[in-house]
Image (cartoon, rainbow, N blue to C red):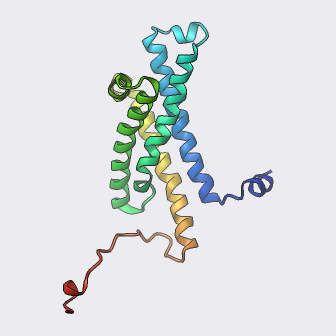
Amino acid sequence: MKQIVEMLTGASDGEKCRWLAYALIAVFGAGISFVAVARIGHGAGLSHAMSIYEQWIVVAGAIGAAAGLYLARDRFGWPGTQGAIRALRGGLIATVTGPVVAGTLALPLYGTMFGPFTFLVMLAGAPILALLWVLNLSAIHVLFRAWRRERNTIFGETPDAPQGRQPRMGRLARGRA
């Protein structure tokens, strides 16, 4: 079965890890949005069929979470302590921008403000959700690490060497006129 999937997608194991990271965060975003819809309706989302608008809010949560990861993707997967610090910053970026995008999609203008507010209040009100969010971001960091490791070996770099940005120096800075 694995060979068939590889033949159809043409994706490497690292690329599959990256796709899985986006799928994880999208499912989590949809789940958080579903919980928000259920809480706003005082649990009504569980006792009756969801309206089209409520379904759209859940889809917007998935899109927003994936967009948040997309905006923070360059911060995940780096090795070492510096990589963990970068992942923390990436997690903060995804935590803020994902709900902004989801809220804007769900309810333009007002949702842009209330999306992040609702998300942070939900995390503060349910510590288990906050813990699951941190674990989800940690899993994404590990998945991106596998992708970066594979990518570095493809381009002939050492597997765990971070790609630091070297400042470009002009002739005057090097002492040549």
Task: Please give left or right for residue 27 compared with residue 123 in the image.
Answer: right
Seen at 63% across and 53% down, the residue is 16
Seen at 35% across and 29% down, the residue is 116
Seen at 56% across and 72% down, the residue is 153
Q: Quadrant of the C terminus?
A: bottom left
Task: Please give left or right for residue 4 compared with residue 17 in the image.
Answer: right
Q: Position of residue 163 (x, y in %)?
A: 41, 69
Q: Which of 83 and 48 lies nearest the eye of the viewer?
A: 48
Q: Where is residue 102 in the image (x, y as percent from the top left)?
A: 44, 31
> Is 48 situated above or below 110?
above
Q: Which of 53 and 26 lies nearest the eye of the viewer?
A: 53
> Is 78 situated above or below 49?
below
> Is 154 situated above or below 57?
below
Q: How many labels does the image show?
A: 0
> Is 118 situated above or below 85?
above
Q: Which of 169 and 73 lies nearest the eye of the viewer?
A: 169
Seen at 42% across and 34% down, the residue is 101
Residue 160 is at least partly visible in this image:
yes
Residue 122 is at least partly visible in this image:
no
For residue 3, which quarter of the picture? bottom right
Q: Residue furthest bottom?
A: 176
Q: Position of residue 14 (x, y in %)?
A: 59, 59
